Amino acid sequence: AQRVTQPEKLLSVFKGAPVELKCNYSYSGSPELFWYVQYSRQRLQLLLRHISRESIKGFTADLNKGETSFHLKKPFAQEEDSAMYYCALRGYNTDKLIFGTGTRLQVFP
Amino acid sequence: SAVISQKPSRDICQRGTSLTIQCQVDSQVTMMFWYRQQPGQSLTLIATANQGSEATYESGFVIDKFPISRPNLTFSTLTVSNMSPEDSSIYLCSVETRSDSGETQYFGPGTRLLVL
């Protein structure tokens, strides 16, 4: 079955500390993985996708097919990174997105 | 990208009634989606709405409960019928666009529904 697991509901760090939001997936094939972010009082928006291999707002995520993971990382967290982060999967030849339960990141000053 | 608006932004309804949520996008799109996000849970796809064809519902969601209209390429509605408190949720509309980066889903602001 297709599934996205985000084991942490809440992650709290201090400003300047490294951050890693975990995401594991279950899919028998080659999925496309995404990270979406929702800042307070804003709509859900795409942060990054694995095929782009880009860094957005200092965040990166590498798809590890062996570990079926797509963890989101940032070396130095900022207060403005505080938000809800969702990992999502899209299977091959489908438009459906399957979301994880989300991780709330709190960055303290 | 795509700019999506939803109406209403929130509502409080009595059980047994129905609510229709509107989704408007600022450009023509083929793929539109309706999601539900129940309190403390993740987003769950209700159905995919393509213009000119009937909506495709996910397991656990039926047309009688969540009828969808898609009259053109910029607009869709989702009706939550015969509501019960279990329908209290955030309902989100999203659209998919294509670019050099691939297909991307953009989300509306959501409609927060409370059923008493």
Image (tube, rainbow, N blue to C red):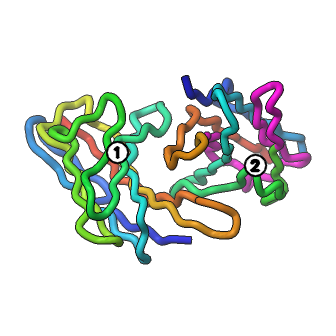
Query: What residue sits right under mark 2 in the picture?
Result: A50
- In reply to whether residue A87 is colored magenta, the answer given is yes
For the record, the magenta segment spans A62-89
Residue positioned 63% across, 50% down in the render: A37
| Mark 1: amino acid | Ala
C-alpha distance separating marks 1 and 2: 25 Å
- Local crowd at mark 2 within 10 Å, few (<14), some, or many (≥20)? some
Residue B6, placed above or below residue B57: below
Task: Say what secondary structure mark 2 lies in.
Answer: helix
Does any portion of residue A97 appear in the rendered image? yes
Does any portion of residue B7 appear in the rendered image? no
Which residue in the rendered view is the most extreme toward the left? B16
Chain identity of mark 2: A
Query: Where is residue A22 shown, x and y percent of the image?
Result: 75, 31
Give the number of the disc on residue B47.
Answer: 1
Q: Nearer the viewer, residue A19 or B57?
A: B57
